[in-house]
Amino acid sequence: QKEVEQDPGPLSVPEGAIVSLNCTYSNSAFQYFMWYRQYSRKGPELLMYTYSSGNKEDGRFTAQVDKSSKYISLFIRDSQPSDSATYLCAANNAGNMLTFGGGTRLMVKP
Amino acid sequence: DAGITQSPRYKITETGRQVTLMCHQTWSHSYMFWYRQDLGHGLRLIYYSAAADITDKGEVPDGYVVSRSKTENFPLTLESATRSQTSVYFCASSPAPSGGLYEQYFGPGTRLTVT
């Protein structure tokens, strides 16, 4: 079993919808949780990160971590066609390297 | 331009050949990483380096060699390429971790095909 799991999708939504992307993880020692966005044939780019449990908001994006259920979420409000990409979650604990999920492909249709 | 670059962007090689993928960053980040990305496996860490002349294995190091004589460069060599090494390879760099957080910045990737 992978330490960080994601549904590969694709997830298809209409423009303007609220998108919920999710990951589960198994390592209770994980402390940092990150979301990367990867456009087709490009490298991943860091969207945002959170430390331990709680929410973090950045514009239309909100990252949420629930350590009790080992669940990581990324919400995108007012989704745009330009949000169409693969979203990768990642986690690590201090002193160790990032562990990535397999990514969820999102398609936002005009 | 500042950033992280990889070369070549595309490479086709034959089984058994030696191939070197190059990575260069201009941020003077201390950490550098090599990942491979395959369908169904996501990003898997091959090797990483905490500083010049310091390297360590990641999750899938077999068949790969790295070196880091200068902070800005981190080449990855496939000593004898195999078809299973057909993949997209990403280099990343990060400043020294702050409280355990690695803010990794990725290059554009090298698409390698081994025939």
Image (tube, coloured by chain):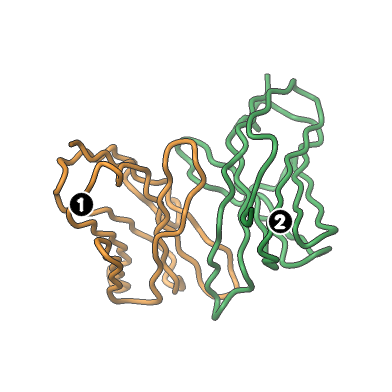
Q: Point out residue A50 in the picture as x, y percentages from the top left corner.
A: 38, 72
Query: What SS does tag 1 mark?
Result: strand
Q: From the rendered image, report the letter of the chain displayed in orange.
A: A
Question: Hey, what amino acid is under mark 2?
Answer: Lys
Asked if the residue under mark 2 is in contact with the one under mark 1, i.e. CB atoms within 8 Å, the reply is no
Label 1 vs label 2, nearer the camera: 1
Q: Residues within 10 Å of mark 2 (few under 14, many from 20)?
A: some
Instruction: Please name the residue that numbered disc 2 is placed on.
Output: B57
Is B82 in front, or is B20? Answer: B20
Mark 2 chain: B
Residue shown at 15%/40% (left/top)? A14
Quadrant the C terminus of chain B occupies: top right
**Mark number for residue A19?**
1
Q: Point out residue A64 in the picture as x, y percentages from the top left corner.
A: 28, 68
Residue shown at 50%/58% (left/top)? A99
Cα separation, mark 1 vs mark 2, equals: 37 Å
Q: Does residue B4 sit above or below B88 in this rendering?
A: below
Q: Does residue B98 sit above or below A43 in this rendering?
A: below
Is B28 in front, or is A5? Answer: B28
Residue shown at 62%/29% (left/top)? B86
Query: What SS does tag 2 mark?
Result: strand
- Which residue is the extreme one toward the bottom? B99
Task: Check the rendered structure and report the hue given to chain B.
Answer: green
Residue shown at 20%/52% (left/top)? A19
Mark 1 chain: A
Question: Hey, what amino acid is under mark 1?
Answer: Val
**Mark number for residue B75?**
none
